[in-house]
Amino acid sequence: MAAQLISSEYSRIVASQEQVSSELEGEAVILDVKSGVYYGLNQVGASVWNMIQAPKSIKEIQAALLAEYEVEPEVCERDLMILLEDLAAKGLIKITNEASA
């Protein structure tokens, strides 16, 4: 399965339905039902994971993170893209690319 590509800040991200997750002491544990592999997310990753239980644009996710955490916008954007690309590569999220502005 090829990873989906994130094309813009308007790409919409949602957690895949083929997994189960649980919060544990502020972090998230995700089980990929198809592969049987567990993944762990730190507090910030868990925050993103909770947000994408319903479809959100990258712009919406980044705005929420900037409001919640003290982080420079460029650092937030870079780290968010790394996380989302990693989740996409593992098949844990679905990405739809919308051309809306």
Image (cartoon, rainbow, N blue to C red):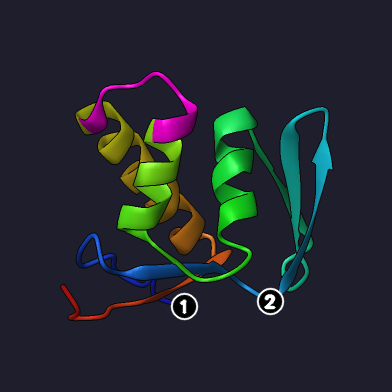
Horizontal side, residue 66 vs residue 91: left or right = left
Residue at 24% across, 60% down = 9
At label 1, which amino acid type do we have?
Met
Please state the horizontal and vertical placement of residue 84, each as a whole percent of the image. 42, 53
18 vs 27, nearest the viewer: 27
Say what secondary structure mark 2 lies in: loop
Q: What is the magenta range?
A: 67-73
Residue at 53% across, 66% down = 93
Which residue position is annotated with label 2? 17
Q: Quadrant of residue 43?
A: top right
Please state the horizontal and vertical placement of residue 41, each as a whole percent of the image. 63, 38
Q: Was residue 69 drawn as part of the magenta stretch in this picture?
A: yes
Residue at 68% across, 76% down = 17
Task: Categorize mark 2 by other alpha carbons within 10 Å: few (<14), some (14-19), many (20+).
Answer: few
Which residue position is annotated with label 1? 1
Say what secondary structure mark 1 lies in: loop
Please state the horizontal and vertical placement of residue 25, each as a whole percent of the image. 82, 27
10 vs 37, nearest the viewer: 10
Mark found first going from the N terminus, 2 or 1: 1
